[in-house]
């Protein structure tokens, strides 16, 4: 199965930590965040992986090479200008298309999620996309779901006015399982983002679902979050 890990961002909110290093290469428990992600992908059968690169791309290439030491086949796609989460997938569409769904994983999301269970749920409901969801009050996203976890509303970075009256504990985790037909929904005018530009159409059609997180998850988007992940993330998850 195929996966794409978004590893192009500059990580500007990390300050000096990412001045000369891509954020996914920051270490947690002795390994880069990206290596933990890739090991979890390999564990669940996602053996063909695309990495998009932009900020200090050589640091990632030098560490991971062709991915063989992880049991993976890695292909790199460099972005001279950032394309957004959906724009990056469209840029790599030729590598992601196929008969099976592909996984899209944010490069700063550290999780030990059972991705096999996510795949089973996606195939069972027959939608075009499945979002890994977790519960976090005050997050910068809100996802409203039916009892069967069909998504009926998705707000990404909502204003207080938009958030008012929306009662849901679920938020976007930054891990998506997508039918390759979703690539045809992405406009060829970057930057394009999945939550803002693609998922609203799937929600309107009733073809986007959620799947609840089981285990650990941390989006490492600040030095404080990095320190927390270093304290919380057990070594066994990256073994």
Image: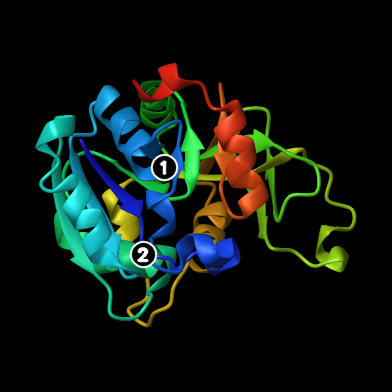
Which quarter of the image is occupied by the N terminus?
A: top left
Along the viewing direction, whichever of 187 and 206 lies nearer the viewer: 187
| Secondary structure of residue under mark 1 | helix
Q: Is residue 25 above or below residue 228?
A: below
Along the viewing direction, whichever of 26 and 161 lies nearer the viewer: 26
Q: Quadrant of residue 13?
A: bottom right
Q: Quadrant of residue 92?
A: bottom left
Q: Residue at x 49, y 38 (%)?
A: 110
Q: Quadrant of residue 29?
A: top left
Q: Position of residue 231 (x, y in %)?
A: 61, 30
Residue mark closest to the camera, 2 vs 1: 1
**Taking 183 as reference, is 149 left or right?**
right
Q: Is residue 204 above or below residue 44?
A: below
Q: Residue at x 67, y 48 (%)?
A: 224
**Taking 17 as reference, is 149 left or right?**
right
**Taking 228 as reference, is 187 left or right?**
left
Q: Residue at x 38, y 23 (%)?
A: 120
For marks 2 and 1 on the same chain, the one whose residue lies earlier in the sequence:
2
Query: Pointer 1: residues within 10 angstroms few (<14), some, or many (20+)?
Result: many
Q: Position of residue 116 (x, y in %)?
A: 35, 22
Query: Pointer 2: residues within 10 angstroms few (<14), some, or many (20+)?
Result: many
Q: Is residue 104 above or below residue 215?
A: below
Viewer can see residue 49: yes
Along the viewing direction, whichever of 41 and 149 lies nearer the viewer: 41
Along the viewing direction, whichever of 96 and 45 lies nearer the viewer: 45
Residue holding disc 2: 8
Q: Which mark is residue 185?
A: none
Viewer can see residue 172: no
Distance of label 2 from label 1 (alpha carbons): 14 Å
**Numbered disc total:** 2
Residue holding disc 1: 33
Q: Is residue 71 above or below residue 34?
A: above
């Amino acid at each position: 199965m195929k996966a794409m890990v978004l590893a192009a961002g500059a990580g500007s909110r990390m300050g000096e930590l990412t001045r000369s290093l891509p954020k996914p290469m920051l270490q947690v428990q002795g390994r880069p965040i990206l290596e933990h992600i890739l090991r979890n992908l390999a564990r669940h059968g996602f053996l063909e992986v695309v990495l998009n690169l932009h900020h200090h791309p050589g640091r990632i290439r030098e560490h991971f090479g062709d991915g063989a030491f992880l049991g993976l086949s890695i292909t790199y796609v460099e972005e001279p200008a950032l394309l957004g989460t959906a724009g990056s997938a469209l840029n790599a569409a030729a590598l992601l298309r196929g008969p099976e769904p592909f996984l899209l994983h944010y490069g700063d999301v550290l999780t030990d999620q059972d991705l096999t269970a996510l795949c089973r749920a996606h195939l069972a409901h027959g939608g075009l996309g499945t979002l890994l969801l977790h519960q976090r009050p005050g997050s910068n996203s809100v996802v409203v779901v039916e009892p069967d976890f069909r998504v009926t509303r998705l707000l990404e970075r909502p204003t207080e006015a938009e958030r008012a009256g929306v009662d849901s504990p679920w938020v976007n985790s930054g891990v998506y399982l997508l039918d390759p037909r979703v690539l045809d929904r992405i406009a060829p005018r970057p930057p394009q983002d999945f939550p803002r530009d693609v998922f609203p159409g799937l929600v309107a059609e009733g073809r986007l679902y959620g799947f609840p997180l089981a285990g650990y998850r941390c989006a490492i988007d600040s030095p404080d979050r990095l320190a927390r992940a270093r304290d919380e993330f057990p070594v066994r998850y990256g073994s």
